[in-house]
């Protein structure tokens, strides 16, 4: 199992996360449902089509927990990890304008 290092992008107000080696389109697809037994399961990356497993621990685990805690305060529920300030899925345009 590959453990990836986490980079927190502070360039945008949404605190968007990017796991090293993941493209923005892949990050936008990450959901709570993909976390199983402490591992984030990515069935297929956009460009390569390769599956990936990332341990949800350490700094990445803290960030995921912070995201989940923040999402509980929204009136709407969305499975995506990358959400905007209203709890709706973040779009590619937001990542570009960051």
Image: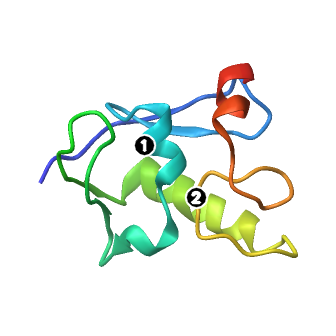
Residue drawn 86% across the image and 58% down it: 86
CA gap between label 2 and label 1 equals 11 Å
Which is nearer the N-term, disc 2 or disc 1? 1
Q: Mark 2 points at which residue?
A: 81
Q: In this view, does 76 lie above or below 9?
A: below
Check disc 2 and report its element: helix, strand or loop: loop
| Image quadrant containing the N terminus | bottom left
Q: Position of residue 80 (x, y in %)?
A: 58, 61
Q: Which residue is drawn at 63% across and 39% down?
A: 16
In this view, the residue in front, 80 or 3, is: 80
Q: To which quarter of the image does residue 57 belong? A: bottom left
The residue furthest left is 1
Q: In this view, does 44 lie above or below 14?
A: below
Q: Mark 1 points at which residue?
A: 26
Q: Is residue 46 above or below residue 1?
A: above
From the top left corner, tell me how far across and down residue 89 is, in percent: 69, 55
Q: Which of marks 2 and 1 is in front?
A: 1
Q: How crowded is mark 1: few (under 14 residues within 10 Å), some or many (20 or more)?
A: some
Q: Position of residue 42 (x, y in %)?
A: 30, 57
| Mark 1 element type | helix
Residue at 54 percent across and 46 percent down: it is 28
Mark 2 and mark 1 residues within 8 Å of each other at the beta carbon: no
């Amino acid at each position: 199992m590959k453990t990836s290092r986490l980079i927190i992008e502070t360039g945008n107000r949404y605190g968007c996360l990017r796991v090293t080696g993941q493209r923005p389109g892949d990050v936008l697809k990450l959901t709570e449902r993909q976390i199983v037994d402490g591992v984030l399961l990515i069935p297929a990356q956009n460009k390569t089509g390769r599956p990936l497993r990332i341990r949800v621990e350490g700094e990445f685990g803290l960030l995921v927990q912070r995201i989940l805690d923040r999402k509980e305060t929204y009136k709407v529920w969305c499975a995506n990890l990358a959400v905007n300030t209203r709890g709706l899925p973040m779009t590619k345009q937001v990542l570009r304008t960051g």
